Image (cartoon, grey):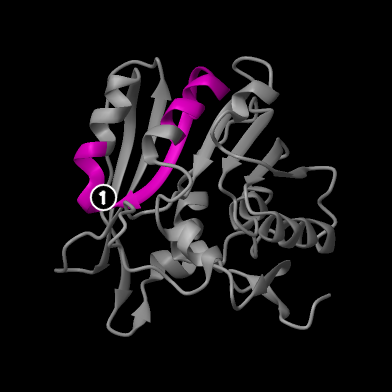
């Protein structure tokens, strides 16, 4: 293992480890909440996480399902880090890490191969004037340098079975744009949940479940509050403890 690599407990869950590097974009609350938000029926066989980074979403989902999970990551060094996390958790038979571009990834699979697509995409649009991080790894993770939200929706459309589900976490300020793109590409929005830093503060993130060619029906879920005072809320702590009671 490289000198600048460290192994952490995923979500504080001592049954899973994740390999991280300080110069890369490490897993965050966004990925944790996204993975928790995903609903997986026993019939699901194939899941793909687009832009998987160092693999937090596939690792978390492995606690919820026996389906096969693919993690797609364009940056080779980051994909290698994700693979180390898979290896250290002995999950090679359940998680496959692929080093590749989101754009055009559907060409590498049979049509409608997946029942579920997940993505924690870059949140910010990219312009020449954008303020970016000195580390390219983090810039690519945070800004739409290599892929846009529409690129992701288009690929998900081709990857998913009819009525398969796309799960996204994104900035609330871009919600209208995302809804318009989903409807334009014949997704119906099934569930939506606003995430707030604290009760009484505006939402800064939103979780979305959209169905490929599904019926138009929306469940607007109760808001999720992340902090109460300086501590995490009981609901967030329960998410962090996922799987512990079953171990």
| Residue at horizontal 50 percent and vertical 66 percent from the top | 138
Q: Is residue 71 above or below residue 109?
A: below
Q: Is residue 126 magenta?
A: no
Q: Is residue 169 magenta?
A: yes
- The picture quadrant where one finds residue 66 is top right
User: How far across and down, in percent of the image, does residue 20 sit?
Assistant: 66, 72
Q: Residues within 10 Å of mark 1 (few under 14, many from 20)?
A: few
| Residue at horizontal 67 percent and vertical 60 percent from the top | 78
Decide if residue 219 is in sight here: no
- All told, the count of numbered labels is 1
In this view, the residue in front, 224 or 22, is: 22
Q: Is residue 213 above or below residue 223?
A: above
| Residue at horizontal 38 percent and vertical 17 percent from the top | 214
Q: Secondary structure at mark 1?
A: loop
Horizontally, is 142 left or right of 97 in the view?
left
Q: Is residue 103 above or below residue 60?
A: above
- Name the quadrant of the C terminus: bottom right
* Magenta region: 152-177
User: How far across and down, in percent of the image, does residue 40 sit?
Assistant: 57, 36
Decide if residue 210 is in sight here: yes
């Amino acid at each position: 293992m490289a000198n600048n690599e460290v192994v952490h407990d995923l979500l504080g869950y001592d049954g899973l480890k994740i390999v991280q590097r300080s110069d890369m974009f490490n897993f965050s609350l966004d990925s944790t909440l996204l993975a928790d938000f995903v609903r997986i029926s026993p019939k699901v066989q194939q899941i793909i996480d687009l832009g998987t980074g160092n693999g937090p979403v596939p690792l978390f989902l492995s606690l919820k399902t026996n389906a096969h999970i693919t993690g797609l990551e364009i940056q080779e060094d980051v994909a290698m880090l994700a693979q180390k996390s898979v290896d250290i958790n002995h999950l090679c038979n359940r998680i496959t890490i692929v080093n590749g571009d989101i754009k055009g990834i559907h060409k590498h699979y049979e049509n409608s191969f997946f029942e579920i697509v997940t993505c924690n995409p870059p949140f910010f649009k990219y312009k020449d004037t954008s303020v970016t991080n000195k580390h390219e790894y983090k810039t690519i993770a945070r800004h739409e340098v290599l892929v846009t939200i529409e690129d992701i929706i288009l690929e998900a459309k081709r990857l998913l079975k009819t009525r398969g589900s796309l799960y996204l976490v994104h900035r609330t300020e871009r919600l209208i744009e995302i809804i318009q793109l989903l409807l334009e590409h014949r997704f119906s929005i099934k569930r939506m949940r606003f995430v707030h830093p604290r009760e009484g503060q505006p939402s800064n993130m939103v979780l979305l479940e959209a169905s490929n060619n599904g019926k138009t029906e929306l469940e607007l879920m109760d808001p999720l509050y992340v902090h109460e005072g300086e501590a995490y809320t009981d609901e967030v702590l329960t998410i962090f403890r996922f799987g512990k009671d079953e171990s």
